[in-house]
Amino acid sequence: MNGANPENSNDKIYWLDVPTNVDRLVRGFYAVCALLLLIDLLVPKHGAFAIEHVFGFYAFFGFVACVTLVLVAKQLRRILMRPERYYDR
Amino acid sequence: MIAEANPALILILGAVLIPFLPYRWRGVYMLLLPPLACANLLMLPNGSFGHIQLFSLPLTTIRIDALSRFFASGFLIAAELGVIYAFHLKDRVQQVAGLVYAGSALGAIFAGDLLTLFLFWELISLASVVLIFASGNRRSYRAGMRYLVSQLGSGILLLFGTLLHYRATGSLEFAWIELGSAGAWLIFLAFGIKCAFPLLHAWLEDAYPEATVTGAVFLSVFTTKVAVYALARGFAGTEILVPIGAVMTIFPIFYAVIENDLRRVLAYSLNNQLGFMVVGIGLGTSLSLNGAVAHAFADIVFKSLLFMSMGAVLFRVGTVKATELGGLYKSMPWTTGFCLIGAASISAFPLFSGFVTKSMVIAAAMDGGHFWIWIALLFASAGVFHHAGIKIPYFAFFAHDSGKRCQEAPLNMLIAMAISAALCIGIGSFPGQFYALLPFKAEFQPYRIDHVTAQIQLLFWSALAFTLLIRSRIYPPELASTNLDFDWFYRRLGRAVAVSTGRCADRLWITVRRAAFEQTSRALQQLLARYGSKGIPAPHTSSMVFWATLMLAALLLLSYL
């Protein structure tokens, strides 16, 4: 297998292979996220629960939920993770 | 009368002919079977048909109403897509098993009584396990056996439940069942196993990833959705389903984050999506039930699309381990695109199918004022986007370039994926027509400005979390590993207990045998010493001979054991 280095292979270089392009993409994505948070001020809300009316509730909930999910799952590995062929022995 | 033929039998009996057809005709023949069954379904009006007597028990083999028609349509579409996806296949065993499996799932949907349901329930298990065995390796053989035990076990519970229910109520009809009697609980448990309730779920994550490339696509559709249908029919509004479903949406996503086998990640996310349906069934309002069955339909399409895309990767690259993949978008751009559409659908992006179906369940939870259930579903929604929406396409097609180069997926696979993707977008973008097919009466408007922005905010900020965690390298790296799940209790603990019990019994037996052997020989020697040729004459020769013979026989027997 070739490594990740595109110069070593005969492949053409894709737009995503250039790190600066990825950075550009990520910066654009951050901007969209910020914009979505600001839009929250403009949207009239009809939610059933009071907490939905808190500024940026859904955005912050999604962020915190995912960070929690990943950090907890990472710790779960200490208890749950075994070698790949664990059951084959 | 042709109109009264069971669409399920068209698939099952039609499949029986497959082995006799030459390879060239088999593909086309199989493509024709689901549309034929579909035409037959369209000709049947709502009502009960196919009444037969079995040992004086009246059975209703076909019951058509809005609910069974809706599920059957989804199954027939999935069967056709599965046949297209497997068009290149030459293995007759899988071809027959796939269609018998689809047909028996259809038969279970149409079953008007519990005994017919049981018969198709078992046929589903037998046909589907073939698709796991067909991988032809030791792992798949063992996983298949475990799958078979759990599925047939579910069938046995269903049979006993049915018998108890029949004795209590005097009716075999498969209608709403009140969860109270022992029979009802057994039936509930049988459905729960097939629906992969928490702690009864491990067969799913264990077996599905071991199935063949095409087999996993079939498996992802039928077994669990039959269970969802059965719960919707038998236990709608049963409150205990709400917490069960909420737990189901949550715990699999933790596993999905750390799992390396991407088809196993999909199995965990299938488990998580089933949770949404179970919550909807448990809430029992017409909106939530519509949401549950609509989400089942959407899931049939987008989950098989995701299994198709990972199957295509497995087919071309030979692995779906995240550690060995990456950068495949260069080799498989079409598959990447279709996978992204499936990912957007399961993540419930606006304009994709999951958005218009899952929202109904969440809205129903809000309407009922179930705050914590709502929080759980919201957490699960963010989580499913995280592992199925981002992780699957990211680690397979993007991430760091693994350097692997392969061909694009075969044309038939691409066609199947394209149609599935079109359905995902069609349902999500034009929900009106889709909602009209739903079995219950409920008004729902998914495209409200506040709802759409809330969903986009939730998803984008979930993706933001992923991006920041990846770029800061906090995100746990993919590792070649096995993660312990509930199956550990029978694969390791249960086996260890069984093995050590066996050893103890063995040791005990050896001790007992040796003791008995020694006692008998000692008694015999004493006898010989006393009454033998050098001893005194025996008072009762005949009984002496009898006892000596008996002891010799015992000695002989013991030495054989």
Image: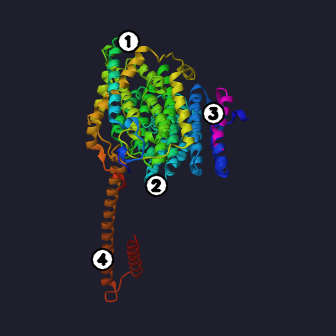
Is disc 4 surrounded by few (<14), some (14 to 19) or many (20+) residues within 10 Å? few
Nearer mark to the viewer, of 4 and 2: 2
Is disc 1 surrounded by few (<14), some (14 to 19) or many (20+) residues within 10 Å? few
Magenta part of the chain: B29-48
Which amino acid, mark 1? Val
The residue tagged 4 is: B522
Q: Is residue B341 visible?
A: yes
Which amino acid, mark 2? Asn
Q: Is residue B55 visible?
A: no
Task: State which quarter of the image contains the C terminus of chain B.
Answer: bottom left
- Dominant secondary structure of the residues highlighted in magenta in the image: helix
Give the CA separation, mark 2 to mark 1. 56 Å
Q: Chain of mark 1?
A: A
The residue tagged 2 is: B137
Q: Earlier in the sequence, mark 2 or mark 3?
A: 3
The residue tagged 1 is: A43
Which amino acid, mark 4? Arg
Q: Chain of mark 4?
A: B
Nearer mark to the viewer, of 3 and 4: 3
- Helix, strand or loop under label 1: loop
Q: Residue furthest right?
A: B1
